[in-house]
Amino acid sequence: MFRLLDVTLLFLLLTLASAVRGQPDNLQRSATVRVIDKDGAPLAGVQIVFTGRVKWMSYANFPCTDSDEPDNFCMVETKDVRGLTDENGLLKLILKFSDMTSDSFGDPRTARLDIEALLSADQQVLQLENAVTEEDTARSIQSLIMLSSPGASRQKSWRLSTPQRQAFLHYYSPVLLVRAEESAPDTLLRNSRAGWDWISNWKFDDDVFKNNAIWKRDLFSYIYRVPNQDGKIPNWRIRPTLYTALIEFMEADADGRLHKCLKLLYHIYHPIDKRGKLHDWERIEMRIDSVGAEPGQQETISYVIITTHNIHNAMRGDDVRLKFFRTRDGKHPLLWQAQWDEPHAGDSDSLNGHELQFVTTDLTADMGKAVVDIEGPFNTLRGKPIRYSQKTFHYIFVDESSSATCKSLNAKAITPASSRRLAYGGSKNTALTAENTRRITYELQDIADIIPSMLEDSDWKALKIKKLRVLYMVDFQSALKDASGRSIIPPGPDKRFYPLARRDPSYNGRGRTGYVAKNWFWGSIRLGTARNGAPPFRQHDMFMFRSLSALKDEWPAEDDPKSLSSYRLPVGWQKKENGGFDGRWIQIFPDH
């Protein structure tokens, strides 16, 4: 006899398994296109539009008419998607239609599939094969297009729109498996650390570093609703947030063909560090090459970089150890994050302080205990990566805008009503069953939200650290803008920033630095080591890893101690006419 818990668990497992399988085949249509010139040479960078129509032939199990005429149907849906041919002149596009079975429609069939090449004024189509089909049972179409102009291989510069940039950041947003240390230091409930390992938001729009003080003082009252103490926090909102930026640029491959490339940055905020004092940030970087107008089409993942404390750990996009949680609306890197505390005598490992690691096993519906294998960073001191087995996790954090992933993992937002249920409150050494992990949503906001708080004329003057008034001067060539497009910091002479983190002017004998002083912020880091290049402090200077024209064997071997050098993008890469966008300085998400 099933208990309610058994039924609920079965439902969650089936839902998760369904999401992993993806959308039903009868609701997807695909197109494979090859574009050549009159001599048969492949043409890269040709924009192709794939349009499809699906008709639904029944409603509530009854046909809409008694006629077999092809135009008699209950409902029809039309969609289109576009992309650019690769260096082989090839492109595969996929259309995903809505599942209308929950609305009682049935028997979806193809009404029409159509392929079109968008050409410049000096081009014309010499030959077009298999560009249209109206076959009821067609699930795919293959087309050959011959163009008159070999110049089509030179794709012009172009830029994504704001919604498209948001879509890429959401599509590749990480799924975070967080190990927590929230056991109470004694048996008194009042000293509970429940919720201490929640991701949170940086209160830049109120008091920029007040959140870490509130965290230790009032979090217990927020979760357990202690009588006569709720008045301290009537307006406090806990919003797990990843602070992001999208960097967009055009780059030529080895044959000189231009491609749209992206660098996606995600930074995770925790109100307390491993000493329970200062806020803490952890960073994720992804490079995506040959992107089209929307994610999930022909683009490729070049690499994923995570920073484990100060070691820059990387995996190539085609590495089989790099795991993703895939749903119909995202391809989410699967990462593990350590708990807040410092290592203790009796710990089975030294993983701590919110450090990130790559997960090397899949997150599945039937995994049983909430444990995964992870891989630590490679650096020259260790000589090779450290691989860890069976590490616990207690929280799963998911992007709230990835609806399929949230549904699969049953992730919920933190509210006063849900906080007690979503707080773990236990030991890092306790292995939960997978279904008992806490599933929580996070939102995306902008790194550009945070930068103004470090300006010289911000409230940093109240810190009374005149003896440590070290300033970084950034050459502003364009304005820093808010979400409405309003200029917050106008262009002009060097802008002066405080690099030190507030409330911590000295950390291990040196100042603990903020965004503008971070080497990774300028792209100036070396992989597999703590060594960094020198930040340039020019607003749109950007170093990148691995040119699009680089050979695959230019990546170091797994145990090669040689770190990769960076290279600089050309001056003016960020300009609209060059197809660039420097998202570190522009807000694209609405503020909350």
Image (cartoon, rainbow, N blue to C red):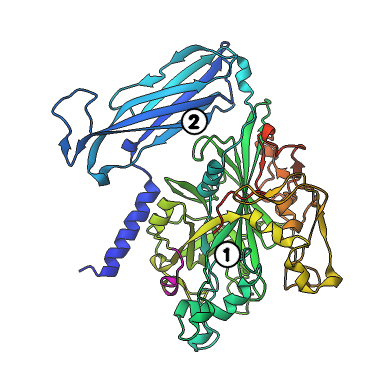
Observer-side mark, 2 or 1, equals 1
* Tag 2 residue: 82
Q: Earlier in the sequence, mark 2 or mark 1?
A: 2
Residue 575 painted magenta: no
Under mark 1, the amino acid is: Asn
For disc 1, the neighbor class at 10 Å (few under 14, some 14 to 19, many from 20) is many
Lateral position of residue 9 relative to residue 337, left or right? left
Q: Horizontal placement of 379 versus 229: left or right? A: right
Pointers 2 and 1 in contact (C-beta within 8 Å)? no
Quadrant including the C terminus: bottom right
The residue that disc 1 covers is: 201
In the rendered image, the vertical position of residue 366 relative to residue 421, given as above or below: above
Q: CA distance from mark 2 to mark 1?
A: 36 Å
Prevailing secondary structure of the magenta residues: loop
Label 2 sits on what residue type? Answer: Arg
**Which residue is depicted at the point 54% across and 46% down?**
166
Bounds of the magenta segment: 413-420
Describe the element under mark 1 as helix, strand or loop: loop
